[in-house]
Structures are given as structure tokens and as C-alpha cells.
Image: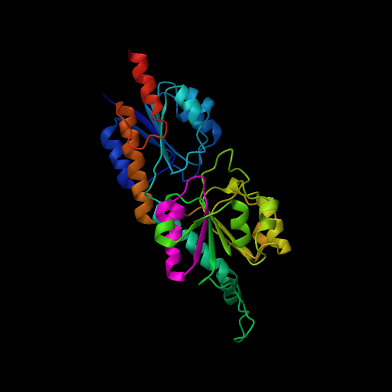
Amino acid sequence: MGYNVYVTRRLPQEALDMVRNACETVEINPEDRPLTRAELLDKVRARDGILSLLTDTIDEEVMRAAEGARGFANYAVGYNNIDVPKATELGLVITNTPGVLTEATADLAWTLLMATARRIAESDRFMRTGKFESWAPMLFLGADVTGRTLGLVGAGRIGSAVARRSRGFDMKVLYCDPIANEALEKELGARRVALDELLAAADFVSVHVPLNEQTHHLFGAEQFRRMKRTAIFVNTSRGPIHDETALVEALRSGEIAGAGLDVYEDEPAMKPGLADLDNTVLVPHIGSATIWTRTRMATMAAENLIAIVKGEKAPNCVNPEVYEKARGAKR
């Protein structure tokens, strides 16, 4: 049977070759940009499956436009861009790419933590603009990392990987998570605490939770006020987890010392004033941006897509109840 699929953005070639070998008709967004809403609604029509990105909002309107499709393979570990309950209701399989980006994202969280603590971006600009005239005792004094307290909001795969990297810096680890991480407690002596206690004690607060109704604006003015004035905030999860306007004010007023961000509330835009602050390190959502990681994410998404269109159980389905629903309908 010849399958007809659509890929919403160009991906590493290995993944595209896999899809082309398994499907008769493969159309790929030829431009390196997100599709407009109108383009997305048009391109999903008459497809057997769609490989989507986190920049594609897959809501009921898009799902109904994709009438006849068996599902969407999302090229991301997070899937807050997809209305999963509606997909399940409509019998659509939704998949993601978990696990593969854990180490790369943990590496970036530490990159942001270290770069913000030691004022690397600010110092780099200073050097490049010819302002460095001589060594000085008070020039770009930053924050110590060794021996300090790391606070993790979320202790799943990525949060745990970030925690393990702290061993080389002899850090105390606190974490806030609905589920106790006994492995982390045993391995690192990490202690599970309430969010307020973590905010008051941590020198570095690193966020690793999924975006949902409970975590939207988990960090706002109140939470930044509870942090140490010397604390540094790092977010490599999803932008809307922090209230960016409140973060700008906290950074501007000195309520916290700095922030390292990979994600933004209104991505790709930044809230007014954020780009003007020297006490920030800002990067464009590159948590998984290594050659190996992005390639493996793509091949995993391709594997999911191929399984979806063939009617097989997808390896990384996030709504497995859709299969039970399909079996029940056949009885």
C-alpha cells in the first residue's frame, strides 16, 4: 500500500530517507521556517500521517483537517503543542521522542548555569568591543558554583541527569517533584522538599517539568521574591513555565542575580526588556541541538510515523488508550 505523509520541516537526511523508503508519497516543507496556520491546515489534508514539530499547534481544527490520517509523530519530547485528549477522542495516535535528548539538554542546563554564574556572555561582549584595558580585582565578579546548593524543579530523566553532573562540584542537591526519586536520593544524597523551601535555599534553580495547566506560570513574581538575591534561575524546559514579565522585573530590580534561558514564554519573541539585561544568558531553544541528538530524534520520529501509517503500535505513543479504543470498536 502506498502511504501519503507530510513532514512539517526539513529534518536530518537519515530520517527523511527512512520515510521515503516506507511511503510512496512524502511531501516536506521546503522552507526552513514554521508553517503558517493556513499552510498547516492545507498540507495535512488527505494524508495517512503527519510528522510535526513543537512549533506546530495541532488542535481539533488541524486534526479534523487531517481527516483520514492515523496520527501525528511529534519531533520533540514535549507534546504540549498537541491536544492529546482530543486526538484520543478522534482515534489519532500521538507520539514523541523521549529519552534521546536527556544528556544534551542536561549539558545545556549546565552550560547556562555556568555561563550565567561566571558572566561569560557579558564578559565576551566586553572583550569583543575593545573595553578590556587591564586586569582588575573587581572586574566581572561572578558566583561560585562549587559547594553551593542546586535546586531542581522536576527530577525526571533530565532533572536527574542535571543533578548527577553536580557531583563534580560537590553541590548539595534539593529537588521538588510530585514523585520521590529514591535513586537520586541514594546516589547523591538529594533531598525532596516543597517548592518554597527549595526556592529559599537554592543558589541555582533549574527547571525540568513538562508544560501543563499545573506548571503554567509556576514561576511568577511570588516565586522570584522567595529566591535568594544571589540566586540564578535556569529554564531549559518550556517558556510558559515562567512568567517572563515577572522574571524581567526580578532581574532588573536585583531580586535574583541572573537567569540562563533556552526557552521563552512567547517563543520566539522575548518579553520587553529581557534582551537589554546584562545578567542573562539567552540562547534560541537549542537544548537538544547536537548532531547526534537531533539525528536520533528525527529517526525516532520517522520510526513512529511509519508505524502509525502502517497501523502498527507506535514505539513512543503518548496516548496508548487510542489502541484500546480501536480494538473495542472492532468487536
Q: Is 258 within the magenta? A: no
Identify which residue is drawn at 53% across, 35% down: 57
**Of 35 and 318, which appears nearest the observer?**
318
Residue 3 seen from this side: no
Residue 284 at x, y percent in the picture: 53, 54
Residue 144 at x, y percent in the picture: 55, 73
Identify which residue is drawn at 36% across, 55% down: 291
Span highlighted in magenta in the image: 158-184
Q: Name the outermost residue toward the top.
A: 331
Q: Name the outermost residue toward the right.
A: 253
**Of 77 and 192, which appears nearest the observer?**
192
**Horizontal relation, residue 121 to residue 79: left or right:** right
The quarter of the picture where residue 127 lies is: bottom right
Residue 320 seen from this side: yes
Residue 283 at x, y percent in the picture: 54, 58
> Against 198, is 320 above or below?
above
> Against 180, is 229 above or below?
below
**Horizontal relation, residue 223 to residue 160: left or right:** right
The quadrant the C terminus occupies is top left
Q: Is 161 within the magenta? A: yes
Identify which residue is drawn at 44% across, 52% down: 158
Residue 262 at x, y percent in the picture: 53, 55
The quarter of the picture where residue 234 lies is: bottom right
**Of 312 and 24, which appears nearest the observer?**
312
The quarter of the picture where residue 121 lies is: bottom right
